[in-house]
Amino acid sequence: MKNIAEIRADFPILGRSVYDKPLVYFDNGATTQKPQCVIDALTEVYTSYNANIHRGVHYLSDMSSEAYENSREKVRSFINAGKKEEVVFTSGTTGSINGIAFSFGERYIKPGDEIIISHLEHHANIVPWQMMCERKGAVLRVIPVNDEGEIIFEEYLKMLSSKTKLVSVTQVSNALGTVLPVNEIITAAHSVNAPVLIDGAQGIQHGVVDVKIMDCDFYVFSGHKIYGPTGIGILYGKEKWLSELPPFQGGGDMVDKVTFEKTTYNELPFKFEAGTMNFTGAIGLARALDYVMSIGRIDIAIREKYLLSHATERLSAIKDLKIYGNSVRKIPTISFLLKDIHQYDAGMILDKMGIAVRTGTHCAQPVMDRYGIDGTIRASICFYNTREEIDILAGGIEKVISMFA
Amino acid sequence: MTINEVQDSIIGEFSFFDDWMDKYNLLIDLGKELPVIDPKFKVKDFLIDGCQSKVWLHPDFDEKLISFTADSDAIITRGIVALLIKVLSKRTPEEIISSDLYFIEKIGLRQNLSPTRSNGLLSMVRQMKLYAMAFDAMKK
């Protein structure tokens, strides 16, 4: 594995400073920074072979179409999907979930049917299902969480029944960092024949994801959270579902034959890719996945475990600091509050010290409600962060506490 | 003092400090001097939208001057509101409506606060001006 200095050198932005202080970037849960190879991939497209995909008879269009389809293959292999046809490009996790919520609702959902989500979901895995339930007269059920920020599995089992038509849960809580027992969730859902969608937005970048072993029916994630470009995301779906589901958008390229009387749809995966896709983003994403593979997903996970344990140790030692989310299964995300100090005040002062954290509800208001708080300060760490940066954060927090004391 | 004289004195006060930490410390101290809002006004009706932290702002009009009291759950925000109140409280509606708040730019509050936070600040100013317009209309 590359050493940490070599890894950091791959990410040009990590070398910059803000307010004359070296940048300490702990907002990786919101978006990750990009390695030079991803930035280069985008430049290469625009400087050497930019042309719309699947349309032209010309050389450049062939080149870009091929690069786009090769990217699909890269994603397929990265998540170990059975077929390329099961990998659909979207605009991101939000786009993927909205698409499935729409199509699945149209095809299968009747009044009284139930959809199960958890109390740990990001708004992107709540609102689309609420909209669908409202449209279809279905019922949204929510798996509760305990004080540590883990779902209460027995309660989930009690919810499952023949009324359950789909379970949609996150792999990892974006607000607390908890890793959910997705394999067990999926097995249980399948025992009542309910398919499962896994929101991998915070999971894909922190370990090995194998959709075959997981046996999920849908897996979705965003490119920008795994060191790729923004505006590109993935919807993986088992072929049997994707074949049966109607498209969620109509337009060019997703059609087979169009007349004013009737339109027949293109084959998978193109049925779900209406209009000009973000092929540049797809190519950049493939390059990011290559990069992750070159570092090694196991090595990334090991390094992140070490950073999490250092951060947890340093932060828990601070008097008046309370960590929210204390599961033993976590990614290196630490959500915390400083007694009596508003998270917004703390975030502003940390910012001035060059430390980027997120404050607020992290698009997961129900999680905050569960703890009776307005928000937290969230340090979301990833493999390119260092022990020293964690020490700077700990020092910064001490300074915040002294300023507001 | 006129609105502009108060603004100039604030600019002078902030110009003593080069370091942002010192400016924040000043804001924290200013927050402590904020005229206390009656707890009964710390309700949804007086909450300002568009801020990351909660800000309650209450206007009182004695047929001549508008007085503001406010509070926030975040201390730095309370300091920012305190500055606005220093400038705009105990003024006539006309003065508030026609005021040009150049001090925000001058003391570096706008460019040093991120857009969402800056919007919070602008929401406060807008709300104060809206109250002034409402009282002005009532008078006429």
Image (spheres, rainbow, N blue to C red):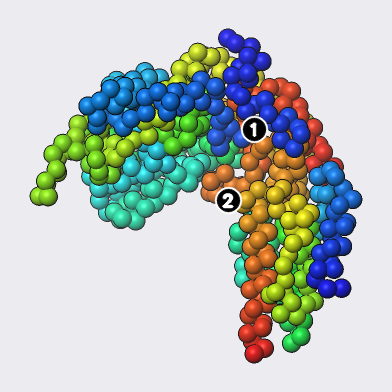
What SS does tag 2 mark?
Answer: helix
Q: Residue at x 10, y 50 (%)?
A: A261
Among all residues in the image, which is located at the extreme left?
A261
- Is the N terminus of chain A in the top left, top right, bottom left or bottom right quadrant? top right
Question: Foreground mark, 2 or 1?
Answer: 1
Q: Amino acid at mark 2?
A: Asp
Q: Residue at x 60, y 40 (%)?
A: A147
Measured as percent of width and height from the top left, residue A149 is found at: 57, 38
User: Would you identify the image quadrant in which residue A88 lies?
Assistant: top left
Vertical side of A121 occupied by A386: above or below: above
Q: Residue at x 85, y 68 (%)?
A: B5
Vertical side of A170 occupied by A390: above or below: above
Residue identifier under label 2: A369
Mark 2 residue crowding within 10 angstroms, few (<14) / some (14–19) / many (20+): few
Left or right: A159 as drawn, with respect to B14: left
Find the distance from the CA under tag 2 to the CA under tag 1.
24 Å
Left or right: B27 as drawn, with respect to B101: right
Measured as percent of width and height from the top left, residue A315 is found at: 73, 32
> Does the image show residue A198?
no
Q: Name the residue nearer the viewer: A252 or A172.
A: A252
Q: Residue at x 79, y 58 (%)?
A: B79
Q: Amino acid at mark 1?
A: Phe
Subunit under mark 1: A
Residue identifier under label 1: A26
